Structure formats: C-alpha cells, structure tokens
Image (cartoon, rainbow, N blue to C red):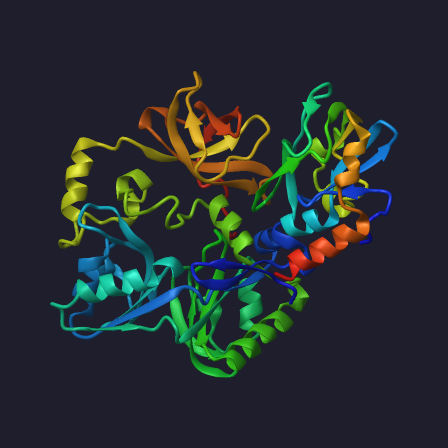
Amino acid sequence: MPYPTDFKYTKEHEWIKADGKNATVGITNYAQESLGDIVFVELPKVGSEIVAGKTFGSVESVKAVSDLYAPASGVVTEVNGELATAPEKINKDAHSAWLIKITLKNPSELNSLLSAQDYEKFVSEEAGN
Amino acid sequence: MGAKMVEFNGWEMPVEYPSVGGIIAEHNAVRTSVGIFDVSHMGDIRLAGPEALAAVQHISMNDASRLAVGQAQYSALLYPQGTFVDDVIVHRLGQDEYLLVINAGTREKDFSWVRDHTRDFDCEVENFSDDFTQIAIQGPKGVDLLQKLTDADLSAVKFYRVTRGRVCGLKNTLIARTGYTGEDGFEIYIPADENTSAMVWNQVLQAGREFGVVPCGLGARNTLRLEAKLALYGHEISDTINVWEAGLDRFCKMEKPDFIGRHALEKAKSTGVGRTLVGLEMIERGIARDGYKVLDEEGAEIGYVTSGSYAPFLKKNIALAYVPPQFANDRTILKVQIRSQAVKAQVVPTPFYNRPKKV
C-alpha cells in the first residue's frame, strides 16, 4: 500500500494530514500490519489537548497494546466514533481510517516529521532488522 | 508461508500467518473447522522400565495407575511446597512405558527434575525433546483431515487416548487425541528431520484443503487456550502458585500413594487458599492484559491478571485473574486497572468456552 505524499509521518508510525490549522491523524499501514488484527482503540475526548511526542491513546491488537504518539500539538476537534465498534477498519485501510482530527497549535511542527519517501525508507530498514 | 515470527523461549516460532488472515481467522478456523500448529517446541520425556509407574506416581500429582495402555491424562510435576515445576500430559504408551509431554520454556528444568527425582526407581529416563516434530491438528474437522492420511481407525481413538499408525507413509507414528485449544483434535509425533517434517506439514495442509484448513501460530494458540481456561506456565501456574489456588483439584489425587508436594498440599488444604483463579469478562471498554492489577468495586487492589485478551470466537474481552476467594462468586463486580483507568469487569463461570457436545 503506497504512503500518501500529502501526509507526514512519525517514527512511531502515526500519519498526519494538515490543511492549514486543521489536521487528521491516523496510524500507518506498516503499523497495522505489525500489530495484526486490531480489536480496540482508545482515543481522547473532543476538546482535550494533545502534545507533540506524547501519548494520546492506544490501539490494541489481539496480541499487543501499542501507545499512540501525537505527531503534533493541538486540540481534538473530532474523534472517529466508528472505530469503537469497528476497529478492524484500520486493518482494512489504515490511511483512510483516521483516529482523530485536531486544530494545530503550531503548523510548523510538521516540518520536523518524515516525508512519505523518508518514512518508507525508515520502515524498510526497520523491517529488515 | 509468510508467517510472522517471534522468539519464544529460545525458539523461532510463528506467532501468526497474516496471509491466511491472522490470529482471529486462525482462531475461528479451529473453532469451526480445523487449524494446524507446529508445536515442536514442546518437550518429551520417556520413562520405561519395571518401576516406571512408581516413578511417574512419585513425581506427578494425577493418578497414573488409572491409565490403561494407550490412555493419557493431564497432570503436573510439583515442588515439595505444592507449587508447579510444570504441567504435563502423561501418556501410557506400553505396559511399563510412559511419555511426559512438557512445556518449551521448562524443558531442561523439567528433564533435570524428572531425572533427579526418579533415580531410586528401576526405570530409564530419556529426553526425546529434540527427536520429534509435533504437529497439532485441532478443530471439529481434525479427525476427518487426519483420517485421510492414516491407516489407524481414528473413530476408535477417544479423547485423551493415544495410538500408533502409519501417517503420511511414516510407520508406527504416535497419534494422540489431545490438544491445547479446547477443541477436539490430534497431536502427531514425527521424526524431527527437516525434510520429513516439511513433507508431513505440506501433506496435512493439502489434505485439509477441502475443510479450509489454516496454519496457526502461537497467537491463536494462546487465545484458544485462554477461552478454554487451559493453564499456561508462568501465568496461571508457576513455582509460587499451588494446586488449590490454580483450581486444578480434580487432577490432583490425594488418595494415591505419596508424591512430591502432597504433604504441603495437605497442609495448605486445611489452612485454605488466600487467592483463587477466576474468569473475568470486561463490562466496560478495555482489554485486561497479563500483570494488570485487579481492584474491588471501591478501588482497592485485590489481585492481578494472569492472562487477558480479546476472545476471537466469543467476541468478548476476557481474562483470568487471581483474587481472594470472597471475590470469586459469579457476577461479582470488580475492576481492572488498565493504564490510567479502572475498568469494570465481572466474574463469570469458566471455561469461557465449552465445545459443543457431539450428538
């Protein structure tokens, strides 16, 4: 599955897509593949603040729990409620099954994140370990 | 095969096969049809000789004298304090011949323990662990699958019975109607060389096509055994947990001749247990995992989770936990500390899953 070039990526395998101050956050296809069948997603409430590099929730597969790290700081404006009952949507298409939408505190934070090309290179090295 | 591998007790093991759909698909194939597992990491100890029965009786808690030739039983090796060296399946293969099937992580410890504590008996003790590839064929269609590959009449082999027959052309193959999934099924023991193992594995997959057989990894093995409340060493049983706490009373025969651990268990029985293993079902959203704290309704810590997961067939979040006996009644409301939240759960009857009885 290709990594969209209009997304930015973290080394913790989250993606973020920004449009001005509004951004959408999810986990990458590589993350869902590594986790396997996702059965539970824990997300922050609308209105709560998330901080770049800090955890904002978790996703669990049958076999593992994985923390979610905020790719950027901001305030949560929307939570993907579908995932509460259908977390497997992330396995089906991780790049469209978003987790949260936020208002960015500082859009320039995204400049320090990985491009699609850099991320792809990063995961191919990680997978090769 | 495209398996996702993981290190398990020094073994490179498949944890799941994403190409067949991953843990949930593997798990449900075993519940509804058939799945196969490479469980060669399990160890095998053979005891044979005039005093083999007496030796087995001395080191294990179940009553091996009740075994007919070709019968197997669940049992355990105990320390003198009544806690677990390991749990085992004891097979009686011949008049004076027994096979103990033991866990991967405890193979060397178990073998030393068995050898050291059977020295006074006239019987040979051999570690066969590296000689066999063990393949588990599990699920309601397991019998139909294996019957295609063997001349042994499997309809005559009841659950927890063992026989020998030709399997995939291999003469005198040990075939046991046992498993670790809570489902009907078989475990076969074939020579460990790579070519033979691969040949049998592939033939089993081929023969199972009509039943939709899938290869299964350690992940599904764990969720299947959890639904069926089968103990895992280091979790529900260990060197600090005794037989009564683990609720394995019916496999411990206090009336048989003396065995290691019996004395301590007798004492423990009179004093009663401080904790007991219960099944939990999550009421609120969240998955209890191994090691998470269990709280009472007011939030005081009372115990811990030994195993917990999403249960793929039951489609619930379940767990096993040690709690004081006063919290063990069905429907008792408890909480599990999941990271920063205390999440509501209730005590439920176990096993969580019982396979349907045949009509």
Give above or below for B26 relative to B347. below
Query: B157 and B98: which one is in front?
Result: B98
Residue B99: percent from left, percent from top? 31, 68
Residue B13: percent from left, percent from top? 52, 62
Residue B263: percent from left, percent from top? 13, 45
Query: B298 and B282: which one is in front?
Result: B298
Give above or below for B348 relative to B45. above
Query: A69 and B148: which one is in front?
Result: A69
Residue plotted at (48% across, 37% down): B319
| Quadrant holding the C terminus of chain A | bottom right
Quadrant for residue A26, please give it: top right
Residue B129 appearing in the image: yes
Find the residue positioned furthest to the left. B120
Quadrant for residue B242, please give it: top left
Residue plotted at (48% across, 51% down): B182
Number of marks present in the image shown:
0
Quadrant for residue B163, please give it: bottom left
| Quadrant holding the N terminus of chain A | bottom right
Residue plotted at (44% across, 44% down): B229
Give above or below for B257 relative to B137. above
Find the residue positioned furthest to the top. B298
Residue B168 appearing in the image: no
Report the side of B88 relative to B305 (left or right): left
Query: B235 and B263: which one is in front?
Result: B235
Residue B253: percent from left, percent from top? 22, 49
Report the side of B299 relative to B63 (left or right): right
Report the side of B86 relative to B164 (left or right): left
